[in-house]
Image (spheres, helix red, strand yellow):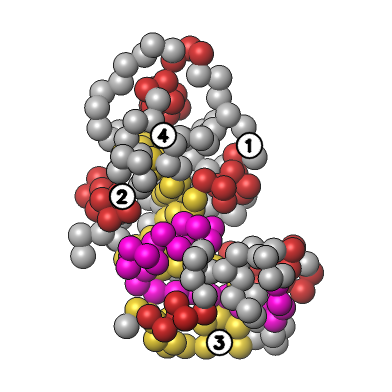
């Protein structure tokens, strides 16, 4: 393939939801613990998330003061920063809204901590923001004009960073976009024995359970807690 192999790796409820209060209950802890363990153990060169997920998990809403970059011009095209990381945090942030203080993820979990950050954005992001990323040592890829061109972005991740396998870790909207583009090769679903609320988001935004018909269930591992690990491959 001219792109990384994509494994969608998520915790979900019995009724197929990936957002909701159930994720923060003691009953879900065995599932989240397994999820994080698999994030460390699955062979990949990193993980990918959408803007909302990255903000909730890592940046906490912080945004830089771009005043010092006002009027700055930057070279056209993508930017590959110098780094020593073997794993990457791929942030799909269409308009460039995330604020990073470091060029790597700062986290105690070795599955995340130390991952070099790559911002994937549309063309037309403000030069001041691009200049800020360059100064901070954060790589970026530009793919698409009004919306992200996911196939192009993935092609660049492989050619520029040598990425062979990438864990897609939500949220629901980003997962749905990958599903529509036919870019998900495998599912790694950690299922907690709980149900979510009707308004909570599904694995793929805009899709119901029928989306799983595009995949073959290959393996189910059951645990004493009631948690299950379900592995699917694209037909």
Residue denoted by label 2: 149
Disc 3 from disc 2: Cα separation: 35 Å
Closer to the chain start, of discs 4 and 2, is: 4
Closer to the chain start, of discs 1 and 3, is: 1
Report the front residue among 194 and 158.
Answer: 194
Q: Is residue 223 visible?
A: yes
Determine the residue positioned at 69% across, 85% down.
Answer: 226
Residue denoted by label 4: 138
Which circle, 4 or 2, is nearer the viewer? 2
In the rendered image, residue 180 lying in the magenta stretch gets the answer: yes
Closer to the chain start, of discs 1 and 4, is: 1
Percent across and percent down for residue 9 are 49, 68
Q: Which residues are magenta?
A: 169-196
Q: Which mark is residue 221?
A: 3
Percent across and percent down for residue 25 are 78, 67
Closer to the chain start, of discs 3 and 4, is: 4
How dense is the environment of label 2, judged by Cα within 10 Å: few (below 14), some, or many (20 and up)? Answer: some
Determine the residue positioned at 26% across, 50% down.
Answer: 152
Residue denoted by label 1: 61
Residue 125: quadrant of the picture: top left
Q: Compared with residue 88, is residue 212 higher up or lower down, i.e. above or below?
A: below
Disc 1 from disc 3: Cα separation: 37 Å
Report the front residue among 200 and 44.
Answer: 200
Closer to the chain start, of discs 3 and 2, is: 2
Which circle, 1 or 3, is nearer the viewer? 1
| SS for callout 3 | strand
């Amino acid at each position: 393939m001219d792109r990384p192999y994509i494994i969608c790796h998520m915790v979900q409820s019995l009724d197929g939801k990936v957002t909701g209060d159930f994720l923060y209950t003691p009953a879900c802890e065995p599932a989240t613990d397994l999820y994080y363990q698999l994030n460390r153990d699955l062979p990949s060169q990193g993980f990918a998330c959408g803007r909302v997920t990255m903000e909730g998990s890592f940046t906490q809403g912080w945004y830089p003061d771009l005043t010092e970059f006002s009027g700055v011009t930057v070279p056209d095209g993508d930017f590959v920063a110098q780094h020593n990381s073997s794993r990457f945090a791929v942030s799909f942030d269409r308009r460039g809204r995330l604020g990073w203080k470091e060029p790597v993820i700062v986290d105690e979990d070795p599955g995340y901590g130390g991952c070099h950050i790559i911002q994937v954005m549309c063309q037309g992001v403000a030069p001041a923001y691009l200049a800020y990323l360059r100064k901070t040592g954060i790589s970026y890829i530009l793919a698409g004009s009004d919306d992200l061109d996911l196939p192009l972005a993935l092609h660049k991740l492989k050619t520029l960073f040598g990425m062979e396998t990438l864990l897609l870790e939500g949220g629901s909207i980003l997962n749905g976009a990958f599903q529509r583009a036919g870019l998900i090769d495998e599912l790694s679903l950690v299922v907690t024995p709980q149900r979510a609320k009707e308004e909570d988001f599904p694995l793929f935004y805009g899709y119901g359970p029928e989306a799983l018909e595009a995949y073959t269930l290959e393996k189910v591992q059951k645990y004493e807690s009631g948690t299950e690990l379900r592995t699917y491959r694209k037909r």
